[in-house]
Image (cartoon, rainbow, N blue to C red):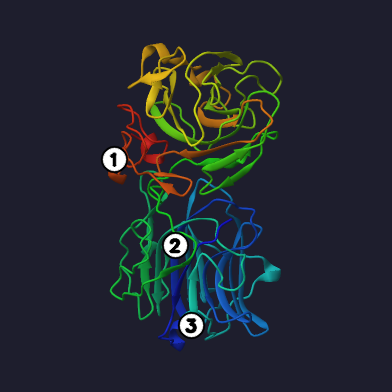
Amino acid sequence: MPNTRLKRTVSNSSSSGRRTFTWSGWIKRNNVTAGYQNLFSAYGGANYYTRILYWDTQELTVSSKQGSNFPVDLRSTTKHRDTNAWYHIVVAMDSTQSTVTNRIKVYFNGVLQTEFHGGDSSYPSLNEQCQINHNDPHYIGHLGGGSSGYFDGIISHVHFADGTAYPASTFGSTDSTTGEWTINTSPSFTPGTNGFSILKDGNGVTDVSANSNNWSVETGTLTATKDCPDNVFATGNPLNVNSGGVGTFQYGNNDITVNGASGSQFGSSSTLGMTNGKFYCEAKIITVDSTMIGVSPSPAEDARADRSPDGQASSGAVGCLVGSGNKYVSGNGSSYGAATSANGIMMIALDLDNLKVYFGSGGQWSNGSGAWNQSGLTSGAAISVTAVASTAEGAYFFSFGDGGGSSAGRIQWNFGNGYFGTTAITTNSGNGYAGAEGKSKFNYAVPSGYSALSTKGLNT
């Protein structure tokens, strides 16, 4: 359950700052069904607060309560439920504007939002003051009151301007080649008295603007990650799971539990798929019994290591059963590696250029005949996979599931973001090892030419 929030108490209140401000942040969601999730707030008590949050319908809301009234209450009709995507959100308020709809502007990935729920929409009146920039505690990741309402996800590059309403183009721009909205990592803006810039490079809460308006971690643990707006890493995909293997997703959707199932099958897959190239990932085994990792040529709702949904052998799915080290190729099991113990770390290397996959454990690779005793990949341990063009989805996914036992399986993926759950990589003096794309962190040395499953890795 998310429980991390940042706090800073404003001590320089101004009426102008309560009318005019800009909040900009990049966010990546984990659990989109966990009720109300607050991104930013100023909390003066149960009846006096202003907040930017996700409604339980996955829609962003800007809300301000003053006594018994809600002078600001805008809920977008756009739903944010892609757990692999980074969203850029800008909320700019200037209640001194004569045109009502100019008094608050909300941008998603550079696009000004104009559609809000009619029955719930309330733009501020002329010169309306909100709670932001009042002498109150301000929070990132929570409202401040109560034990619920934490944001479940990642927040990066948070900028705040006191006294100026900026457009989204201050903090990002459209790539002329791809047409995608991209981050401006060093935006030029006037922060004003209470303005700040934090979470800019890693998990630093020290204000890097000229103000020194530093924040503190009041509750929970703030975890750094290689996953960022300009290099999106794969995670487990809670929106794409086998109906018989649905479990829990936590810690950035990389700590996954799947239910016990009848027969070896994959229950979840990575959010990103691979069509060509060479890719590497690691999985820390939390529950050994019947746990299985591997690759699948279609998302987890269809992919099974021993059979397809119609009961026939599925072409191309390859799994490695943790408890025995046996390989399963389209339903046929045979000796391959050895058993991996609890908290052991397994590795997968997928070579789609040569249509081969390899498994390893504890920093050693399989010899193909029942042991993890190879320092590198060997031809005797290569398992053939089906050509991508002949698969149902035209891509391969890293996959995880239950090997047929009654106990639920659980692993912690590291797709290159440098963590198993909340535990940082400690090898190589804490630096870990990067993939060929140079922007990842793994526990073990990555085979030459293999990249992390990330946007930079896919383009290496």
Mark 1: amino acid: Asn
**Earlier-in-chain disc, 3 versus 2:** 3
Which one is nearer the viewer's eye here, 245 or 101? Answer: 245
Q: Which mark is residue 25?
A: 2
363 left or right of 288 in image: left
User: What SS does tag 3 mark?
Assistant: helix
User: Could you tell which of marks 1 and 2 lies nearer the N-terminus?
Assistant: 2
Looking at the image, is 18 positioned above or below residue 417? below
Q: Residues within 10 Å of mark 3 (few under 14, many from 20)?
A: many
Q: Is residue 141 left or right of residue 248?
A: left
Looking at the rendered image, the disc whose residue lies closer to the viewer, 3 or 2, is 2
Disc 3 target residue: 19
Q: CA distance from mark 1 to mark 2?
A: 33 Å
Numbered badge on residue 428: 1
Mark 2 Cα-neighbour bin, 10 Å: few <14, some 14–19, many ≥20:
many
Helix, strand or loop under label 1? helix
Sooner in the amino-acid sequence: mark 3 or mark 1:
3
Q: Is residue 165 left or right of residue 238?
A: left
Q: Residue at x 30, y 27 (%)?
A: 448
